[in-house]
Image: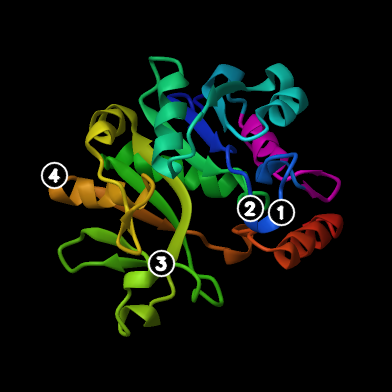
Amino acid sequence: MTNIFDNVGVVILAAGKGTRLNCVDHPKAMHLVGGKPLVSYIVEKIEEANIPKANICLVVGFCKEKITEYFGDRVSYAEQTELLGTAHAAYIGSRALPAHLKFVLVLNGDDSAFYKLETLEKMVAVHTSDGAVITLLSVEPEDPTMYGRIIRHEDGSVEIIEKEYLTEEQKQIKETSTGTFCLDRAWFERIFPTMPRMIKLGKLGEYGMPTTFAMARKENLAVRVVKMEDNREWFGINTLDELQEADQRKKQGL
């Protein structure tokens, strides 16, 4: 039987330090939630899809030994020695995957603990059958105030605008990015070396995944957005209160 993930490599970003959560001796993705590391939930979900371990790459960085000791040889690894943003980490992970894979699914290890496999299958199915170079999983949280927004233009193109640059009209839009992307691998690895850094407060920042949409739009290439049906699946953890809430949800079996 054909597996929707047969030609897809999975890159899970887990290199971040988690400064706002006071992580000093372990990566953010290794915070315990429901008695297990945060990132372990998405790894287990991906393993349910019978994806070969060589096709699952954890991008590690800060306190990488905590991750490699926990997962051992269940996955492969790539190291992000400089924390230069999500697109940079995705590129490092993509380059570490087996050469024959055509697509790359990029997930954050710190916000995907409640994902359902069916959600990822739907997204990958759209991407691999639709001819897009990039597909984004979106969500409509109850309060999107702290996030950028997805802007859908009349010509079919899509833009991701950071919250600092939203107009008052755009702030009324609730749809935002989950940070989960499916990419045409050859295209992404071609364009990344020319990707500009995001501008934050007038200074050069990191290489961010939202920039890929701008680059696809510039080349007049197809992009897709798949909206998450149940917004409770996406749960970003940036504060101790959110960490505690995620812990309680897992203990309740969610």
Q: CA gap, disc 1 to disc 2?
A: 5 Å
- Secondary structure at badge 3 equals loop
Sooner in the amino-acid sequence: mark 4 or mark 2: 2
The magenta segment is 32-49
Q: Position of residue 143 (x, y in %)?
A: 54, 77
Q: Residue at x 74, y 63 (%)?
A: 240
In terms of image quadrants, where is residue 232? bottom right
- Secondary structure at badge 2 equals helix
Q: CA gap, disc 4 to disc 2?
A: 36 Å
Amino acid beneath label 1: Asn
Q: CA gap, disc 4 to disc 1?
A: 41 Å
Where does label 3 land, which residue? 148
Q: Residue at x 49, y 39 (%)?
A: 83
Sooner in the amino-acid sequence: mark 3 or mark 4: 3
Disc number at residue 19? 2
Q: Is residue 108 left or right of residue 248?
A: left
In this picture, is 137 found above or below 69? Answer: below
Sooner in the amino-acid sequence: mark 3 or mark 1: 1
- Residues tagged 1 and 2 counted as in contact (Cβ below 8 A): yes
Where does label 4 land, which residue? 219
Few, some or many residues within 10 Å of mark 1 (<14, 14–19, 20+): few
Disc number at residue 22? 1
- Secondary structure at badge 1 equals loop
